[in-house]
Amino acid sequence: MATESSLEQVVRPAALKPAPHGEWLESIRQQVASLRFGVIQIVVHEGRVVQIDRTEKIRVEPKN
């Protein structure tokens, strides 16, 4: 059974570092702020944010 530290090494090798905060972080903030219902998905390749996907849901209120 793998320990937590050995599992962490498998999932995130030391060679890969988190992407630095940059324009993508501000873009995500803007997307979240303007979204009422939906999903923001962040795609990361080799520790760098390469794509931001937004899926918006529009809720229709039933008339009573």
Image: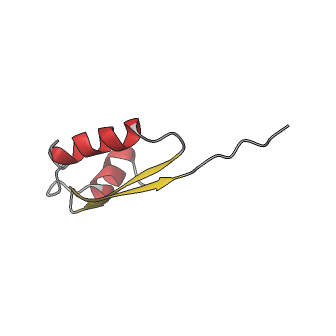
The front one of 20 and 15 is: 20
Residue at (38, 45) in percent of width and height: 4
Q: Residue at x 36, y 53 (%)?
A: 7
- Residue 11: give x, y in percent of width and height: 32, 57
Q: 61 and 16: which one is in front?
A: 61
Examine the rendered structure and indicate whether residue 19 appears above or below residue 10: above
The residue sitting at the front extreme is 63
Near-viewer residue (47 or 35): 35
Q: Residue furthest right?
A: 64
Q: Quadrant of residue 48?
A: bottom left
Residue 45 in the figure: left or right of residue 60: left
Q: Is residue 37 visible?
A: yes
> How many labels, in total?
0
In the picture, measured across the screen, residue 34 lies left or right of residue 20, that is right
| Snapshot quadrant of residue 13 | bottom left
Query: 22 and 48: which one is in front?
Result: 22
How did the renderer colour the structure?
Answer: secondary structure
Q: Position of residue 37 (x, y in %)?
A: 54, 43
Q: Is residue 20 left or right of residue 8?
A: left
Visible in this render: residue 1? Answer: no
From the image, which quarter does the C terminus lie in? top right
The residue drawn where x is 32% and y is 46% is 5
Place of residue 20 in the rendered image (x, y in percent of width and height, measured from the top left):
14, 45
Residue 41 position, x and y percent, is: 40, 54
